[in-house]
Image (spheres, rainbow, N blue to C red):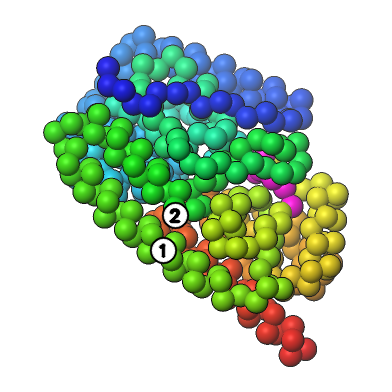
Amino acid sequence: MPNFLFRCAKVGARTLAPRKVAQRAAASAAVVLFTLSVTACGGAAGGNAPGNGGDDKPVVLTTFTVLADVARNVAGEHLTVESITKAGAEIHGYEPTPGDIRKASKADLILDNGLNLEAWFGQFVEGLDVPHAVVSDGVQVMSISEDSYQGKPNPHAWMSPVNVQIYTDNMVKAFSALDPDNAAAFKANGDAYKAKLQAVQDEMKASLSALPENQRALVTCEGAFSYLARDAGLREVYIWAVNAEQQATPQQITRAIEYVKANQVPAVFCESTVSDAPMQQVVGATGSAFGGILYVDSLSEADGPVPTYLDLIRHDANLITKALTGAAASQAKS
């Protein structure tokens, strides 16, 4: 069996309400039972690809859409790449379905982010005889500094195009082991994609570096922008650290309000996969503008604003720059 950087993702600690614990325990039990039935029977009939496309390309399954897009750029025409979660899905608390297990049982390789992002992943792959690669291996990890997640790794490493170049290298390695005949093509595709990633990184840094010092604060619902903020020289502030329960406590909202008021932050933001209602409370209490919706955990559909990872980074950088500079100019006139 090839060396695929095999490693099971660790499940991050999370505090859940008793009802939620019971629900997830029941769901996990159902997943395990279904997994055993699938593996015992050799998987569902019909082709080797999760999508039953009928071709003989090796199948790579990723845990979410961002990884799938990066993987397709590296794989080119030589592999079939699919995502377990769909466009617009919240990745942190995702619960696999029987259909997901069926897809996974027929895959040749599963890619996950690691860094405790996919809290469901360890249970998901249990009982499946399918290798997986952790694409964040080698990234300089940043830790979460607040809330009950303090000290744990911030999993959103893909929000740095520099980090995604490391993701790309890990995919080239895993794909070359999976399909050695096309190793040269994977290397060439990876090099070409890394050049695009560096160009987007340079664009993002240039656009955000133009912000005046007093506007260089990024206030969001989730603490998902540590790596982007680090690369662009922004101060990161958030309501909650991780999209776990998607509910903000009064203390978290108060903390954000106090920061925005004290620093006269001109605009604040929220992410596409959660409600912006908590951030609208911050807007109402401070007079700061709502800068718009940022994308992190999921791409959009093909006709949406961020159908690719490169589009996602460009969208977020442009929105942050325009909102902060535009809102500040409006405040100055009033």
Residue at the spot 50% in from the left edge and 16% down from the top edge: 32
- Give the distance between the C-alpha atoms of the residues marked 1 and 2, in whole angstroms: 7 Å
Name the spot of residue 157 as percent of width and height, x first.
52, 46
Q: Is residue 13 visible?
A: yes
Tell me the magenta residue range.
Answer: 239-244
Comes first in the chain, label 1 or label 2: 2
- Mark 2 — residue? 161
Using the image, determine if residue 233 lies above or below residue 99.
below
293 w.r.t. 105: above or below: below
Residue at 65% from the left image edge and 35% from the top image edge = 152
Residue 294 image offset from top left, x and y in percent = 57, 60
Q: Main secondary structure of the magenta part?
A: loop
Q: Amino acid at mark 2?
A: Pro
Please give the name of the residue rendered at 32% of the width and 58% of the height, measured from the top-left corner: 195
Q: Secondary structure at mark 2?
A: helix
- Please state which of residues 128 and 38 is positioned toward the viewer in this rendering: 128
Taking the image as shown, residue 34 lies to the left or right of residue 40, namely right
Whether 243 is among the magenta residues is yes
* Residue 106 - label: none
User: Type of residue at label 1?
Assistant: Val
The residue at the far top in this view is 40
Label 1, on which residue?
A: 200
Q: Is residue 285 magenta?
A: no
